[in-house]
Each structure stands twice: as C-alpha cells, then as structure tokens.
Image (cartoon, rainbow, N blue to C red):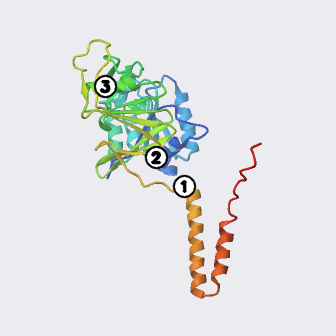
Amino acid sequence: MPRGPLMIIGGAEDKVRKPTILKHFVALSGGRDAHIAVIPTASSLGREVVDVYDALFSKFGAASVDAVRPESREQAHDPVLVKALDEATGIFMTGGNQLKLSSIVCGTPVGDAILRAHERGAVVAGTSAGASIQSSHMVAFGVGGATPKQRMTQVAGGLGLVGRAVIDQHFDQRNRYGRLLMIVAQSPQLLGIGVDEDTCGLVEDVAGELVMRVLGKGAVTIFDGTRMVSNAYEATRSSPLLASGVVFHTLPEGTVFNLTTRALVTQEPAIQQEDAAELAEASRDLRQLARDIAAADATPAAIRRRLKLRRGPAPQTPDPNQGDD
C-alpha cells in the first residue's frame, strides 16, 4: 500500500470565503467516511481551537472529529490517544509553537502512531507549526530577514515524513528567506521548503518518489543546495553567509515538483474553457461543411455564404480621418 498524502500548509489557511485547502483535506480523508484526529498540542489556545476545526470539518462532511492533545511526553504515551490516531483516516496538526509540538510528540507512541497512519495510507496534514514538524529537520525558532546570517535560527528534529528536508511556513509574509537559506547553507543535503500562507504543498507517493503539487493562493519556495558553495563552517557570529550556486524554485498553484529528484515536473498546458468552446464550435462547422460537400446539396457560393454567417461580420476598419473623443 502506498504511503498516504501529506498536506504541508503555510498557515492562515482560508476558513470562511474559499476554504479550498481544508475541503481538500476532508475529501482526501474519505469525505463522509472521514474520521479525523486533530492534534492541537502546538496551540496556546484551549478547546476553542479544536472546536473551530471540528465545526469546519463536520461542515465539509466528515463523519467524526476527535481531539488528540498530549500536553507532555507522559501524556503522549496514553493508549487512548494512540488508538484515536490508529483509527483516523486523516490527521490534522494545528499551528502554534512547533518546538513544543516536536518536543512532546516526536519519539513517543503518539508520534509513532502518526508515522504508522502515514504508512497505512491516511492523510497527515498540518498548518504552520503542524507543517514544520513534517520534515526531518525543523525550524525551532528564529528571526526573519532576506539575508542569511550565522545563528539567525535554531533547528530541531521533526517527524521525518519528508526526509532530507526542512520546512518553514508563513514564508513570504514573514520574510523567512534568510533563515531557511541559512539552514541550507549549513546543511546543503537538506532541501529547503518555504510555504506561503493559505498555500499547501500536497505531497504524494508516486512509484516510490515524493511528488508535490501546489494548492492555494501563494507559492512554495524551494532552495536546493546540492552544488552550492558556502562559508557557513567558518563564518563568525551573526555575519552574512556566502551561499552561491543555490538552485531556487518559486512554485505557484498547479505546479508539480519531484522532491526526490529535486526537479520540476512538466505539465501539459491547460486549455482555457473559452478556447475549448471555440475549438468545439469550429470542429462542428468543419463536420457540417464536409457533410454538405459530400451530399453535393450546396453550391460553392452557398457554402462560402454559410461560413461567412458563422464567422460573423468582418471587423470594421477605423476611419483614419476621425479623431478620438
């Protein structure tokens, strides 16, 4: 059985006007058969954060929504919480403090249950902090800024659902280019993935490779340091870093990227609805013309007049002597 989809959401996903991402999560989780477990451990809010997602997921047709909220590593050993995750068809991790989330969940029975769910085909989604924890390495905290500087962020271990990668969120909105590039400069084997708000990287297992399709109104930014040159190993405290030869990708909605091969997946160009309608109409005209000729029931002059009527009146040539109003 292939591993389940991952939904890496950059935070601030639309919940009211156009909740496309959250609807997609419920649909992937089974729609009316969806049994969703919400993990709000990262959040500083109380029961209300679960109530919000409970109301939304139920509105979108989910059969049940359960809260799985360990507040300590001891609670993350609770068999009741583990059972809820083992029975879930979709797991959703909320935003908040990602270091709190990883320090409580990673390496515990609750964390192992999330990994098992992914392996058996369930959907694992997370927004903001819940996005960051999905990679093997995770931004623990740090400052924003466009220039990568030594020691501008700290890294912690994540769940490892996306291997050899580090995920950051609220990416463009909080100007987190520098801190993600700093991590890649220090660890060029890691693929840097930055996700904008109300944007999702939908990652699926395709023939053993992880392929990501972008959803939402923003973009996903990729830093690939496979062949980069960096001075991170000798840079002094807070100094700007050399980062040369980084491959940079900006991926808007509809883009597909292979995370395993680190390459863009080319897509067939989409045909606009208006173009498709015009093409269908032209095809019908040609078929009718062929039938008319084959039946020999129309003269060439009549056929020309018929085509002229279908095309509409010819555009008028403007009078060069008439000025603009």
**Which residue is at 30% across, 28% downward?**
184
> Is 19 on the left-hand or right-hand side of 30?
right
Residue 254: numbered disc = 2
Pointer 3 or 2: first along the chain? 3
Label 1: which residue? 272
Q: Residue furthest right?
A: 325
* Residue that appears at 51% across and 57% down: 271
Identify the residue position indicated by label 3 in the image.
Answer: 183
Of 167 and 43, nearer the camera is 167
Q: Secondary structure beneath disc 3?
A: helix
Label 1 close to label 3 by CB (< 8 Å): no
The spot of residue 10 in percent (x, y) is 46, 33
Image-based side of 85 in relation to 244, left or right: right
Q: Is residue 288 above or below residue 98?
A: below
Mark 3 residue type = Ile
On screen, 166 above or below 313?
above
Tell me the CA gap for discs 3 and 2. Answer: 27 Å
Marked residue nearer the N-terminal end (1 or 2):
2
